[in-house]
Image (cartoon, helix red, strand yellow):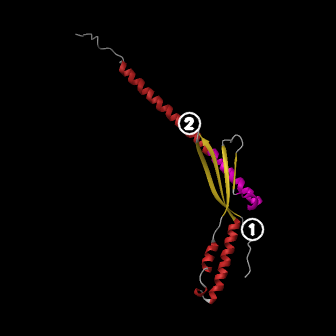
Amino acid sequence: MKTNNANNQSGFTFIEVLLAITLFVIAAVVAVDLTRGSVRATQDLKEVTTATWLLKKTMTELEARIEAEGFDKACDKKKEGKFEAPFEKYRWVTRCHEIDFKLSQSAAAMASQAPEEREEGVSREDQIQKMILKTASEHLSKSMRELHAEVFWIQGKKNQRSVDVTTHVARYDLPLAIPTL
């Protein structure tokens, strides 16, 4: 004999529906947050890539100017500016420094020895070494420069970001001034 049970109904209870909606909302919020983070990361990457490209362009222009005009005309201690549209949110700074190799300091240390500490024949050699180190130091310092370029931009409301690069340029066409004894 079969009995009908009125309490045996199929379907979802209110708590089950509420739990399912809550899980769906949490999953949707996480998905939206991940998407927003992905969009932000993509935007950051685009800005860094653009700044890196502008940095490379700035450094290439500086190196080309130095090659064409020489250190005296093209190598400013500090120069800054802004990029034109569509890159007006970016600005640049370049610096050009003479490199002091300080080889002459070794010569000065040798020359500072008391004359009685040196032998008669060594004194002439010390003078020649001093002259060679001083000449090499002056020539290297005159023919090399350190170039530094930096590109800045504002990310968001107040966060300043930048990319920078430093390189060295040598001019091989400068004459070597060799002093006479």
Q: Is residue 141 magenta?
A: no
Q: Give the percent coordinates (x, y) of residue 158.
A: 58, 41
Which quarter shows the N terminus? top left
Q: Residue at the far left: name it.
A: 1
Please report the residue visible at 65 percent of the width from the left and 48 percent of the height from the top: 53
Segment colored magenta: 49-76
Question: What residue sits right under mark 1 in the picture?
Answer: 174
Give the numbered dot on residue 48: none
Please report the residue visible at 50 percent of the width from the left and 35 percent of the height from the top: 34
- In contact (CB < 8 Å): disc 2 and disc 1: no
Q: CA distance from mark 2 to mark 1?
A: 52 Å
Residue type at mark 2 is: Val
Task: Mark 2 or mark 1: name the one nearer the start of the chain.
Answer: 2
Mark 2 or 1, closer to the camera:
1
Please report the residue visible at 58 percent of the width from the left and 86 percent of the height from the top: 117
Residue type at mark 1 is: Leu
Please report the residue visible at 62 percent of the width from the left and 73 percent of the height from the top: 105
Q: Residues within 10 Å of mark 1 (few under 14, many from 20)?
A: few
Question: What residue sits right under mark 2 in the picture?
Answer: 39
Corner quadrant of residue 125? bottom right
